[in-house]
Amino acid sequence: MPRLLPSLAVLLSFALAAVAQIPGVRVDLYPRSLVTANGTVDVRMVILAELDAELPADLVSGVQLQVKVDDNPGPAVRQAGKGGAVAVTANTRIERLLQFPAATLLTNVELQQTATVSLAWEGMPGANCTFRIAPDPSRVRFESLDLAKTQVVLVTDYGEMLLQFRPDKAPKHVESFVKLSLQGFFDRTKFHRVISDFMIQGGCPLTKDDGKIAEWGQGGPGYTLNAEFNDLRHLRGTLAAARRGNDYNSAGSGFYICHKDAPQLDGGYTVFGNLVQGADTLDRIARVPVGGPTNSLPLQPVVLHQAIVLPVLKK
């Protein structure tokens, strides 16, 4: 009787099992923790061989990722590698950057809520990671948002900060901040004024241009907001609107987050939200070296890469 050849599925499972049994080889995946559905997923892959080994070339040149979205199977991400094997010596470290559109991981790109995505390299126990995909901001209808529950994540060079809002106290300021975030207005701006044990300030569109450094802090969205003074206090993590000098009704896109309690500001500036996660990021930004005429300009840029809205819809 002729011997039957193993099926492709059997061969694949054998190959993956072989990958999983490589002694002294560790694979880790490090994604950005949050991305929008219209954005790009960046996953840093680190392969560490503690011993001499032969690695499947697909591990260093292909992609074999299983996907789950909110614990449901999603579209797998596969890209054939060069095939064969790659010999490496002990203490070899290989880093790869895996990039693909976030939409390729979703069966429904019209997300209404933030989704949790899990990636796992096939056949490599421990080579997995989890991150979140927020809805495409261009598909979010502002009128449908519950602003008291909707949040915004500030993704910076130094980590993330999660903000929540008080539309019951300052409705126009909350509306403006969330709308500007949906429009990408804050993306790639910089925190241009940092005073440790006081506050960090950003939101000026002119900070995208290093050639306009003398004007940083003077830019805005093309409109101003009247003050909405309220009884919210300036505590560590308080989010409030910056303004021009003593003109109470000159707030625009500028905002600040208190690093420490600042009771001297109570009642004189519009408080419209607060930090709920990311106090460690706030601390790292507040402690960057500063200089300039007022000794408050970060010597190295503190970039706000993206302000990502985490929508909660009205019921």
Image: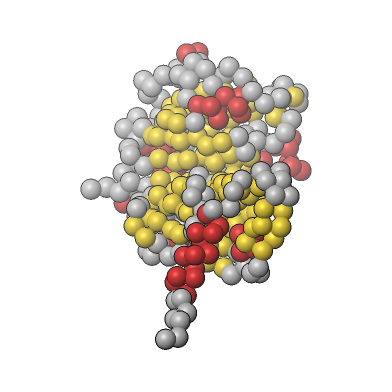
Color style of the picture: secondary structure
Can the viewer see residue 145 in this picture? Answer: yes
Q: Residue furthest bottom?
A: 1
Q: Is residue 218 above or below residue 70?
A: above
Residue plotted at (59% across, 48% down) = 23
In the displayed structure image, the side of residue 8 where residue 84 appears, left or right: right
Q: Residue furthest front?
A: 1
Residue plotted at (50% across, 59% down) = 17
Nearer the observer, 93 or 292 = 93
Q: Is residue 174 above or below residue 133?
A: above
Can the viewer see residue 240 in this picture? Answer: no
Nearer the observer, 124 or 292 = 124
Residue 179 picture location, percent across and down: 44, 47
Q: Quadrant of the N terminus?
A: bottom left
Nearer the observer, 170 or 202 = 202
In the displayed structure image, the side of residue 86 where residue 136 appears, left or right: left
In the displayed structure image, the side of residue 204 where residue 74 appears, left or right: left
Residue plotted at (71% across, 25% down) = 290
Q: Is residue 263 above or below residue 298?
A: above
- Total number of numbered discs in the rendering: 0
The image quadrant of residue 58 is bottom right
Q: Residue furthest left?
A: 315
Residue 278 picture location, percent across and down: 49, 31
Nearer the observer, 314 or 254 = 314
In the displayed structure image, the side of residue 243 where residue 84 appears, left or right: right
Residue plotted at (41% across, 19% down) = 233
